[in-house]
Amino acid sequence: MHMDPIMPIIVGCITAILLIGLLMHTLKQPNVIAYLLAGILLGPSVLGLVTEQATLDRLGQFGVIMLMFFIGMEVSPKKLMIKWKIALIGTLMQAAVSVLIIKMIGYFLDWSNIFCILLGFIISLSSTAVVLNMLQARHELKTEHGQNALTVLLGQDIAVIPMLIILGLLSGDQISTMDATLQITGGILLLGLCVFIVIKPNFKIPLIGEAVKDDHDLQVFGALLLCFGLALISGLFSLSSALGAFIAGMVVATAKEAQWVHHSLESFKTVFVALFFVSIGMLVDIQFVLPHWFEIIGFTLLVLIINTFINGAVFRLFGESWGNSLYTGAILAQVGEFSFVLAAVGMSATILSHDDYQVIVAIIVTSLLLSPFWTSYFKRLTETPDVDS
């Protein structure tokens, strides 16, 4: 029997992730950094071990969906509705001020209006995966600032849809009546589901509640059906699949099924989230980055500062202390995974050139790599305590 040619690639990827992960563990850094560095190392610009990135990208998208599903299980629908103003105002302020600042910079660099809007949108989105990873590692997910951060992240994830619509209109694309109708209908249905689980808590999920609680094999498939089923329905209505997965997580948590679902899917989430960040690391072109490293680092630091203080101002507006506000702002300072979607759309619409795209990818990845150090600095600066509730 001949060896499958994909086997060396699989072994190489696992080895790189494990070795870099052990190094990051020794340095007390989150695993996300290891995944990104492994992707850069394995990608076409360094070792070139992985060349078929399209498949890896698709697998990585499953990681985003499962991540949002797990986040949904950590969020109380009632608390989320109470905090809706933070999500709305925080997201709008972040996007508007980011676009305004980029527009001011673009005035001196002769950037077009649509380029400034796209870049402002890109830097205004934070990374759900990195933030969740950090909050869990620091036992801050259930804290007030942890829940505030997750609320803003949800608002940003929802905001991706109107951002894409705005960019489409500005670039000359026409939105069909069918798509608009589907999105409105899907939004109403998902909102109705959220209202239902608030007014009728402790309900039982049909078919996969009590029936599979003692069967581990069926638990896995039941949990996968919950996660990807609602993600599919959301996608069919031209909405984000990740949004559907998030609401599925809230349904599971409200039905008190979170414990066995979490246990059944934890390993799947770990693998797919790792693949997602490895695929992001592979987008970085080291040969392009090295000659432009100064500009990339400088702009990344500017983005971290902008996002920290905009989000900090939002939380301060809602009564948080300046210390907690700035620390939560630092948690949300990095640029997120959905920004890659906006950048790809910008490139396909010729808003971005190939070089522009490479710079933006490098800035996003650099912000993700610097995020743990950035938040640790603000944690010490603001002396925010580690509390579990």
Image (cartoon, grey):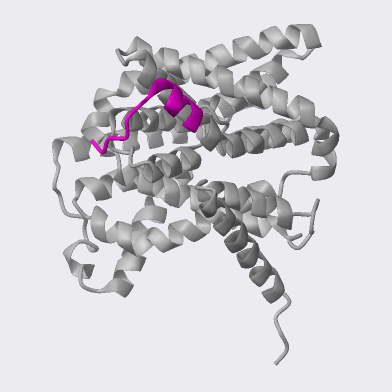
Magenta stretch encompasses residue 377: yes
Q: Is residue 52 left or right of residue 384?
A: right
- Viewport quadrant of the C terminus: top left
Residue at point 68%, 55% (across, down):
54
Name which quarter of the figure residue 104 lies in.
Answer: top right
What x and y, as percent, mark residue 303? 61, 22
Of the pair 41 and 152, the residue shown nearer to us: 41
What x and y, as percent, mark residue 50? 73, 61
What x and y, as percent, mark residue 347? 74, 33
Residue at point 43%, 19% (across, down):
326
Q: Is residue 130 visible?
A: yes
Residue at point 57%, 17% (across, down):
306
Residue range highlighted in magenta: 376-389
Q: Is residue 341 visible?
A: no
Of the pair 81 and 29, the residue shown nearer to us: 29
Of the pair 325 and 229, the residue shown nearer to us: 325
What x and y, as percent, mark residue 289? 80, 37
Vertical placement of 53 versus 122: above or below? below
Count of labels shown? 0
